[in-house]
Image (cartoon, rainbow, N blue to C red):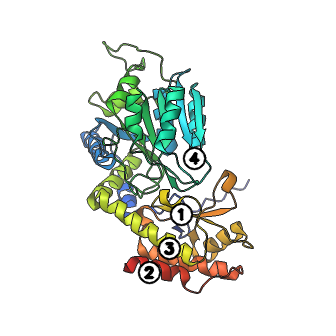
Amino acid sequence: MTSSPIARPVDPPPRLLMGPGPINADPRVLRAMSSQLVGQYDPWMTTTMSETSELYRGVFRTTNEQTFVVDGTSRAGIEAALVSLLEPGDSVLVPVFGRFGHLLTEIAERCGAKVHTIEVPWGEVFAPEVVEQAVRDVRPKVLAVVQGDTSTTMCQPLEDLGEICRRHDVLLYCDATASLGGNPFETDAWEVDVVTAGLQKCLGGPSGSAPITIGPRAVEVIEGRKHVEAGVREAGDVERGVRIASNYLDLAMVMDYWGPRRLNHHTEATTMLYGARECARILLEEGLDAAVARHRLHGGAMLAGVRGLGLEVFGDVAHKMTNVVAVHIPDGIDGDAARAAVLHDYGIEIGTSFGPLHGKVWRIGTMGHNARRDAVLTTLAALEQVLRAGGAPVTAGGGVGAALEVYAA
């Protein structure tokens, strides 16, 4: 009998991740995540959890007490929000302008909700009056909207939606996974009731933790469905309403876990907590406005650079996210082969897209730790060489030159 070979240590190849996410994590985040574990109820640990909540209040620009992280990828945060807000039979309205609007639709359907959608062609966003008319028609309990949809690179304006929802007694939930930290977001000023995000985009960390903030109107709805587990239930714990369908993603219980009761729910993902805390700390150290300006600068340089290469930009550029651009793949270029060449020859990853855009556009990100000058210029230089090798008519130095003009302005 022969023994199986021992697996090699984890040793990923060097990559510059310039797609729509994930991105290269900030080295400071990786250092924080290498710290030793402590017990989940150690006073140092509970203090760290409280510090993380306070830091994310700054990131979300909110005073919401219920601000913390859900253990899981950004999709766990989305599911936690929707499964905790929506009971079977509730109506929800989803404006769909890309793949991730379809995701919100599916998750809401799995919650047993009656889902109503409005749609615009990929590459466009919704005017507020269109959303308000749909709210009047549907009268939903929840309006669930994506801010930045990386499948199309579009950024949905939110400034008017909170006021619309308040006038019609609707809860506003927003998935800000791809946009938070690199695009303006004002939870309280825009009157957004629930916001969820992820670390792997503009926040500069790895996937695996989902920051969330929950306003008072949504807290009231969630606590109206509160059921404490039998094993930890205490005198005075009263079951209320329809029990939330998920145990792990039950925000009523998770709020008790993060709150003063520290009521046992799950074992905190300590290493991810360290990473999430450091992501928020770094962002606030830089300053939110400065971080958005940095993403706008380097995203603008990338936008100018791809145009300097002669590439056609996809979608309504006036409503494009700061941190990702989509370009039409030139005629005669094999999109997948070109992406593979950029990865193999230069160690740089760029993305394609989904659904109707798959194989038709490339998506290039400038976000988080990778929203910086050298990453932009290196990516443009590599892309130029691959395009030239594929026979595309490219002006020598056109991409880098156009980006440098942005930096010189």
Dot 1 or dot 2, earlier in sequence:
1
Q: In this figure, which residue is indicated by the disc labeled 3?
A: 304
SS at mark 1 in the image? strand
Q: Position of residue 49 (x, y in %)?
A: 30, 42
Residue under label 4: 97
Mark 3 element type: helix
| Amino acid at circle 1 | Val
Number of the label disc, if any, that sits on residue 404: 2
Q: Which residue is found at the position 50% from the left and 27% from the top?
A: 140
Q: Amino acid at mark 2?
A: Leu
Q: Please tell me which residue lies in front, 1 or 61.
A: 61
Give the vertical position of 35 relative to 87 (above or below): below
Residue 82 visible in this rendered orientation of the protein: no
Q: Can you give x and y, in whole percent of width and height, for residue 312 in the image? A: 61, 69
Which amino acid is tagged 3?
A: Ala
Q: Is residue 174 above or below residue 184?
A: above
The answer for how far apart the CA atoms under marks 4 and 3 are is: 25 Å
> Mark 4: which amino acid?
Phe
Pair 2/4: label in front? 4
- The residue positioned 40% from the left and 64% from the top of the image is 296
How far apart, in angstroms, are the residues tagged by discs 1 and 2? 17 Å
